[in-house]
Amino acid sequence: MKKIILATLLATASLTAQAADSVKIGFLSTLSGPAAGLGVDIRDGFQLAMKHLNGKLGNLPAEVIIADDKQDPNAAKQAAERFLKKDKVDFMTGIVFSNIMLTVGKSVFDSQTFYISPNAGPSQLAGEECNPYFFNVSWQNDNVAEAMGKWASDQGFKKTVIFAPNYPAGKDAANGFKRYYKGSVADEMYTKLGQLDYAAELAQARAAQPDAVFFFLPGGMGINFIKQFVAAGLSKDIRLITSGFSADEDTIKAVGTPMLGLFNSSHWAYDLDNAANKKFSAAFEKEYGRLPSLYASQGYDAAMLMDSAVRQTKGKLDDKAAVRKALEVAKFASVRGKFKFNTNHYPVQDYYLRLVRQDEKGRITNKLMGTIFTDHADAYVGQCKMAK
């Protein structure tokens, strides 16, 4: 009986929903502090997409309201409440860090506002806490590390030390690496989120005498870690490997030549060969004077996904069931090429190996080296019991 009533209500909502006059997006991200580069790249990618869409989503005028979460859960919660209650946004996006996402998620979902994640992909929202109003256009936190774990095993590394910050995404990354790495993990070091000095931890890693060190340290954390790792002479005997979050354009620009030779895994690459990516990469470099990062590519895709949903529903944003269905279909040209959502609203996608090297113009950047996973899904989708 409940299912019949729900179906009737949804059908009635579909018939009575009117097309909106405009679309409001609440963009909440880390735009200050050591990790600001990540939020700035997501914002710039999103705004580039809006420029390509002539400032509209689905042919409706769009307003993007931007706020800085300062990498502070309390500041993020306050900003999200303003978006939801005062601005009455139709979509939210922008969050970098998983602890921030988990803090604001409940209020966003309770308000029946669709959140399009351009980065944060906590395991909780992929599994038991999956939600019909949450869509992740990037990855689940474990996935990119899983790819590096598989590659490390394929390379025959027998003993590895893991570094990650002590917060949800750090734990997810470590678990992901271990899920596919078949060698021995000599040590796992969970450092303070935002830590910038790793002298003590690097001495501990040296003592373990591993073949490789895998680290997940986004933003300023990764920048300092790589500099200190190389300066300590550890790169002479230990292979440093990472996920794309700590070997992207923001990190490369800040670290420079010590980045050369660093292998990393990613779901996207600047030189990935498809029409949407070529357009995006060239336009981003022209617009901002720098090469795009994976964060920027995710911001771009987030806007394009929103555009596709508004377009397919003909702007009837009050019809939540129709908007959800349109988002699930994901009918847009992703910079990754093929794109599809799993049943938990996380992507099923390919993961690649990249190498930091100098290109033909003498720039230090990533080169696509090959594919590690094809059509790879996250490990938590089976725990998701999302209502249809």
Image: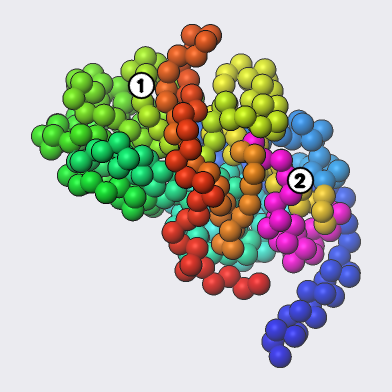
Mark 2 Cα shell of 10 Å, populated few (<14), some (14-19), many (≥20): many
Extent of the magenta region: 314-335
Q: Which of marks 2 and 1 is nearer the N terminus?
A: 1
Q: Camera-side residue: 103 or 136?
A: 136
Q: Is residue 266 magenta?
A: no
Residue 261 tag number: 1
Residue farthest toward the bottom in the current orientation of the protein:
1
Looking at this view, is 184 or 328 the one in front?
Answer: 184
Q: Position of residue 46 (x, y in %)?
A: 66, 36
Tag 1: amino acid: Gly
* Whether residue 109 can be seen here: no
Determine which quarter of the picture holds residue 335.
top right
Find out whether residue 316 is within the magenta segment: yes
Q: How crowded is mark 1: few (under 14 residues within 10 Å), some or many (20 or more)?
A: some
Numbered mark located on residue 49 in the image? none
> Which quadrant of the view contains residue 59?
top right
Q: Position of residue 376 (x, y in %)?
A: 50, 51
